[in-house]
Amino acid sequence: MSITADVQRRAFVRPVLAGLWSFWTEGRRVERVCYLVGAVLIASGVFHLAVFAVDGGPWDGPVSWRKPTTFGLSFGLSLITIAWVASFLHLGDRLRTVLLSVFAVACVAETAMIAFQAWRHVPSHFNMETPLNTVISMALAVGGGVLIVVLVTLTARAFKANPGVTGSTRLALRAGFVTLLVALASGAIMIARGVVLVRTGHQQAAYSAGGFLKPVHGVTMHGILVLPGLAWLLTFTNTTESRRTRVITWTTAAYAVAIVIVIIYSLTRALAD
């Protein structure tokens, strides 16, 4: 039994690894650039995690090594993911290049500004205490707006008919982009709340209360990887397409329930505070 299981495992793992490698070898130039840039951003997140391990200090709060760590890891993974899932969408070469290039620049800019502020030991978001901090805070908000425009455009494309992908993949892409829109919406709400608090003279409250939807933002951010990733992995199994579609449907439903639970938790906690 152990020999049979080992053979079956190899029969699954080897094609998966070959498939992953093919995304690089067969990928468009802009996609490969995004993969490389994403890897660099992930490396920056790991680097700042090491800095935290050496330097210490609080993990939570507006000034900590948490933000450059999580932003590097999250933006790096998001950039790689978006470049990958966009390869399944029906896009013209020029539009694909523009969207992915703009997204990559925005990811780098956001991560760099967060890291810059962390090394200065000052808050990044909602920090309007000096002219430089105000410029950076506003630039972060503008960068978020750019990300929203790109991702909304890709989401719209995901809902266009594309006979080149299977039904399970199509469902996973659409559901994944919808969860990503929820992440963007939660981020926009947090920024708006923080800005209102700052504008009304509650600078410190903005730091503590502005991130009340962080759990929602975190859970929904990477549904665009989880769902299409699962759909892709299922293609290496012996299951039929109809069964793969059912698996994605149930997984999407479970993910939606998890999102609702996290939203209720976040709002309840915010009201209690």
Image: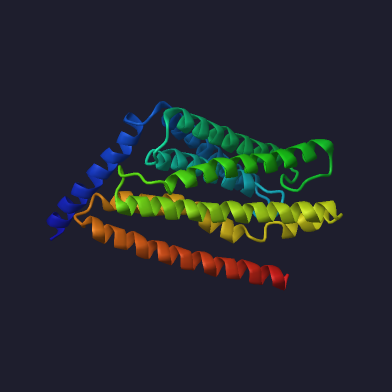
For the question of whether residue 58 can be seen, the reply is no
Residue 115 vertical placement versus 57 (above, below): above
Q: Quadrant of the N terminus?
A: bottom left
Which image quarter: residue 49? Answer: top right
Query: Is residue 177 rendered to the left or right of residue 51?
Result: left
Residue located 51% across and 64% down the image = 259
Residue 172 vertical placement versus 94 (above, below): below
Residue located 79% across and 35% down the image = 132
The spot of residue 27 in percent (x, y) is 36, 31
Q: Residue most toward the right? A: 201
The spot of residue 247 in percent (x, y) is 31, 62
> Which coloring applies here?
rainbow
Query: Is residue 168 rendered to the left or right of residue 240?
Result: right
Residue located 74% across and 41% down the image = 138
Q: Quadrant of the C terminus?
A: bottom right
Total labels: the figure holds 0
The spot of residue 62 in percent (x, y) is 71, 51
For the question of whether residue 223 can be seen, the reply is yes
Residue located 71% across and 71% down the image = 271
The spot of residue 24 in percent (x, y) is 35, 32
- Front-most of residues 131 and 184: 184
Which image quarter: residue 112? Answer: top right
- Front-most of residues 210 and 93: 93
